[in-house]
Amino acid sequence: MIKINNGLNTFLDAAGKTLKTAPKLYDDLVQPTAKQLGKTLELIPRSINAALSPAWNWVIHREYNMAETEKLLSEKLKNVDPNKIVQPEAYVAVPALQAISYSMNNDELRNLYANLLSKSMNVDTKDSVHPSFVEIIKQMSPLEANLLKQFNDENKNSFPIGKIRLQISENNDEGVEWLLHIIDHKFGMKLSNYTQYSVSLENLQRLQLITIDYKTRFVNKSLYSEIENGDIVNHCKTSGPSLHKYYKYPKFVEGQFSITNLGREFISTCID
């Protein structure tokens, strides 16, 4: 940008000197045009700089981000035999390195990319790294990354989930869906953030990392007690009867969600 500005200044200085030596006869005609041209040319680099400033900012920090990525990978691979550290496949490493540079200020997403890269550089695990995992992380929020980690920490594959329907009565199923995808509050879901969590669960299902099924439920009813007695369901029981003209009975419907095979492989690569 410095060269561009210097070039413009040189041009404008030369234009000014030319105008000073021009016959006075043309002053009224030429000078206003030249001044307007000068103003226009001055605006061009400013506009370009303003438009590109976010990109320039990324370029300036790119080397720092790459250095931080190297530190992360060194930590992840510190217990791996150096002879087993290999060059990762370009179709995995290149998009992952590009993506991690945008996520350095977020621990959850940064660690997903770092785990993916470290597994792709270990001869024992590189074949399990699917190239779609990079695109999956790109479409995840930090909350979704955190939820997957919590699900994995439970050492289970299936979990209780519930929804609320507004019906005519307890035994008459005619009605409408109200609140979907209510999970145990131990995962962080509460009334104030219900929508955010519900959307995140749907996105994990869209990415085929989990399945949500309300036609299948656990035989052990006590598994649903934390959800059914939580603040979200209690709020629904209190406010539900006044929400609809015909459907006034808020019914809690049990279901379950499970981690898919793809989800398990993703967790093994990017979270474990």
Image (cartoon, rainbow, N blue to C red):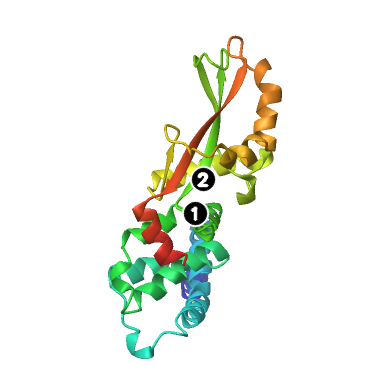
Res 180 visible: no
On the image, the x and y values in percent for residue 93 come to 35, 71
Three-letter code for the amino acid on which mark 2 is drawn: Ser
Crowd tier of the residue under label 1, counting other residues whose Cα lies within 10 Å: few below 14, some 14–19, many 20 or above: few
Q: How many marks?
A: 2
On the image, the x and y values in percent for residue 239 come to 69, 23
Residue topped by disc 2: 200
Residue topped by disc 1: 33
What number is the disc on residue 56?
A: none
The answer to which image quadrant residue 178 occupies is top right
Q: Nearer the viewer, residue 2 or 257?
A: 257
Left or right, 259 with respect to 72, comes to left
On the image, the x and y values in percent for residue 125 come to 33, 73
Judged from this view, the residue extending furthest toward the front is 220
Label 1 sits on a secondary structure element that is helix
Q: Nearer the viewer, residue 25 or 135?
A: 135
On the image, the x and y values in percent for residue 7 come to 46, 73
The answer to which image quadrant residue 243 occupies is top right
What's the CA distance linking mark 1 and mark 2? 58 Å
Q: At x 59% / y 40%, what residue is drawn? A: 222
Q: At x 31% / y 76%, what residue is drawn? A: 88
Up-down: is 249 above or below 232?
above
Dot 1 or dot 2: first in sequence order is: 1
Q: Nearer the viewer, residue 258 or 89?
A: 258
Three-letter code for the amino acid on which mark 1 is drawn: Thr
Label 2 sits on a secondary structure element that is helix
